[in-house]
Image: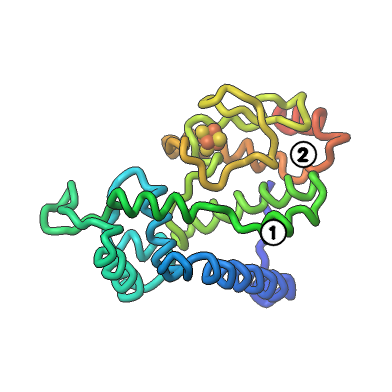
Amino acid sequence: MTATRLPASDPLVAQVTAGLSRLGLALRTHAWRDTAPRGLTPTQAQVLALLQASATPLRLSAVAAGLSVTLPTASDAVKALVAKGLLAKSKAGDDARAIALSLTAAGRDAAESGARDPDFVAAVLEALTHAEQAVFVRSLVKMVRTLQERGDIVPARTCVTCRYFRPLAHADDAERPHHCAFVDAAFGDRSLRVDCSEHAEEVPDVAARRWHEFVAVSGVLGDATSAATSAKDVLRGP
Ligand code: SF4
């Protein structure tokens, strides 16, 4: 299912931009409240979180890209973290002239202590029904993947790019139509991961096929009463 092209002048674009900006402001405000007592700025805390989520040390340019900040901003945060003993610099594995950044033991502790999810996000989600939460998470995954494809964000560890993801493997089950081969369990849209520590990147052509299967039933699974038959019909094709 392909969405029609939306002009930037469409009022929906302005309204979604305003809504996302408000949510971003709320996240940043809470980040300040959470990180200040730990002696970190939100950017420094984000650098720790990014390196904690990365399987390998990262270069400064990758840190800047991962946080969507400028190189000087990333550099300032990294310098402060190195001075605090939370980050270590070493030679990059693929280029002896380049510097790679990794967490020290103290940095890992700091990253773990800051990994708490903000309570206000839980409060926001409580305002949604289970069906709305599922549609929200599904939409979030699609938006993150689109940004990733455009090069606007660094690759995220989402289900839709994971080797273990089997979309619609249980098309008869409206609540839990997908399958995670890592834990060998069925799950629904509400449990789709945007950042999963068990994620393993799928090869591009298989990931593209799975993505097509996943989006082919957009708008179908939100309706639990017709999901089982509709999902099967979509996968079966004309
Ligand atoms: S391992 Fe994680 S990212 Fe991969 S399919 Fe399972 S839950 Fe999704």
Q: Position of residue 44 (x, y in %)?
A: 39, 66
Q: Nearer the viewer, residue 191 or 232?
A: 191
**Residue behind mark 1:** 4
Q: Is residue 48 above or below residue 43?
A: above
Name the amino acid type tagged 2: Leu
Q: Is residue 182 above or below residue 201?
A: above
Is residue 71 toward the left or the right of residue 144 in the image? left
Q: Is residue 178 above or below residue 50?
A: above
- Residue 1 seen in the current view: yes
Depth check, mark 2 against mark 1: the one in front is: 2
Q: Residue at x 75, y 27 (%)?
A: 232
Q: Earlier in the sequence, mark 2 or mark 1?
A: 1
- Residue at the extreme right of the image, as rendered: 225
- Picture quadrant of residue 7: bottom right
Give SS at disc 1.
Answer: loop
Q: Position of residue 225 (x, y in %)?
A: 88, 35
Q: Is residue 16 above or below residue 53?
A: below
User: Colour scheme of this structure image?
Assistant: rainbow
Q: Position of residue 63 (x, y in %)?
A: 35, 61
**Residue behind mark 2:** 221
Quadrant containing the C terminus is top right
Mark-to-mark CA distance, 2 and 1: 20 Å
Name the amino acid type tagged 1: Thr
Q: Nearer the viewer, residue 235 or 115?
A: 115
Q: Residue at x 60, y 49 (%)?
A: 141
Q: Residue at x 43, y 55 (%)?
A: 49
Is residue 194 toward the left or the right of residue 107 in the image? right
Q: Residue at x 71, y 52 (%)?
A: 136
Q: Position of residue 175 (x, y in %)?
A: 76, 32
> Callout 1 environment at 10 Å: few (<14), some (14 to 19), or many (20+)?
few
Residue 55: mark:
none
